[in-house]
Image (spheres, helix red, strand yellow):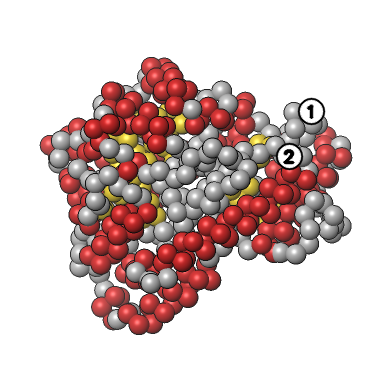
Amino acid sequence: MIQYDLSIAENRCIQEETTSLVRTFLHEKLEPSHLSYNKDIAGEPGLLSALSNLFNAYFQPSEEVRPCHVALAAGASICLTTLIRTLCNTGDGVLIPTPYWNGFDFHIAKQAQVHPVPVSFGKFTDSFDSAAIIRALEEAMDSTSSPVKAVVVTNPHNPLGRCYSEDNLFSFARFCGRRGLHFISDEVYALSNFGSKAAPGASPFVSVLSLDSVQAECKRSKVHVIWSMSKDFGCSGIRLSALVSQKNPELLKTLSFAGCLQISNLATLSALGILTAPQLPQLISTNKDRLAESYQIMTTFLEQRALEYVPATAGLYVFTKLLPASEVGVSEARLAEILKATGIAVGTGQAYHAGDAARGWFRLVFSMRPQHLRDALIQLGVALDLATTAEDQNMSGNRQLKLKTRRDVGCPRKEQQTSRVTKKNKSRIRQGES
């Protein structure tokens, strides 16, 4: 039984505050009409307005985001799937810098029937080097046999927990412009940039929306941003996301129609209860403070055990090397089994498509209350001690591992539906001519 789940990127830092806001709003606003079908195909006007206000306030767009620039979907994953289906044909490809979230394999490859084309880097630090980005994009583009239609980036990065600089984003945009590709930026962690003294010189969050389209040399009709309520507000169960595309109305119509019957009125009301609350700025600030606190607890544990990690400035996780190269007796998969047997779930680095560079690396989620995180790290320390001292070849993966409780392990004890699109309109959408 999993007691401490460090594998799923859910934000539990501010769920009490968001729950209070939603409960109050539903109590005041819920009416019998909200139990009927949604009458607005484009989405609730008040929610579209609240979202555009959010983007204008926190994403610093070079062109004001208006409600007509926003399409709603039942979560970021389905938003991405519908977008990819609309822009691509079956068998086309999209470039994705590695390491990348393994959920893309399902949503892009399985659901959209489009090939994820990994853009590989020799080192994790190369992921944020503009020259290395261009080289890697060119190599991936030229080596694949699939017709490439788009570049998909996650900013802030998942699983590295860093933000792309403005120069990095210009590199992606100019490459897309030069190659005639769509530029899709998944910005679901945009408001979860907490900063870190451990990463001096790291870029703060910069949205693709803030890029000047002339300097970017990429048609604005081919630039699309995805954001959702899930990560920044701890509302992964609400299932509500937004696509921002400022010069492609046909694309927005397609996604709006696909999502109009998938988004419940209760999800809409819940989102409105958060986005229109006077406490919104304080909520965002509190979230950043609590993420920073939890990150400090996590990295203190890692440093006390001399474990290498990528210093993070955003997101809900840290990418760390739990298996030093010298420890050849325990494989990455075996360590994950041992951790699971002791009640700890983690994300293995190999699942993020980083190749040999990710051997022995794991993604550990820290976005939880401090006491729960401390307890999880105590148990993680016990499991790591067991893994490095036990004879791996003599251990059964299904054996029940009984561990004594320890408090001295480097952590002090304290806490779709997609719509039909005419061939003519689909062609216009793909070419960015709308």
Given residues 181 and 66, the one toward you in this image is 66
Q: What amino acid is found at the position of numbered circle 2 in the picture?
A: Leu
Which circle, 1 or 2, is nearer the viewer?
A: 2
Where, by quadrant of the figure, is residue 277 drawn?
A: bottom left
Q: Is residue 227 above or below residue 108?
A: below
Residue 286 image point, x, y percent: 52, 63
Residue 384 image point, x, y percent: 78, 45
Q: Which residue is mark 2?
A: 307
Residue 273 image point, x, y percent: 37, 71
The tag on residue 326 is 1
Label 2 crowd bin: few (<14), some (14–19), many (20+), radius 10 Å: some
Q: Is residue 16 left or right of residue 48?
A: right
Where, by quadrant of the figure, is residue 146 drawn?
A: top left
Question: Real-space Cα distance between discs 1 and 2?
Answer: 13 Å
Q: What amino acid is found at the position of numbered circle 1 in the picture?
A: Ser
Q: Is residue 141 left or right of residue 434?
A: right
Quadrant in the picture for the N terminus: bottom right
Q: Residue at x 25, y 62 (%)?
A: 49
Given residues 36 and 279, the one toward you in this image is 279
Question: In what element is the residue under mark 1?
Answer: loop
Q: Is residue 191 above or below residue 101?
A: below
Quadrant in the picture for the C terminus: top left
Q: Is residue 116 left or right of residue 403?
A: left
Question: In what element is the residue under mark 2?
Answer: loop
Q: Is residue 201 above or below residue 8?
A: above
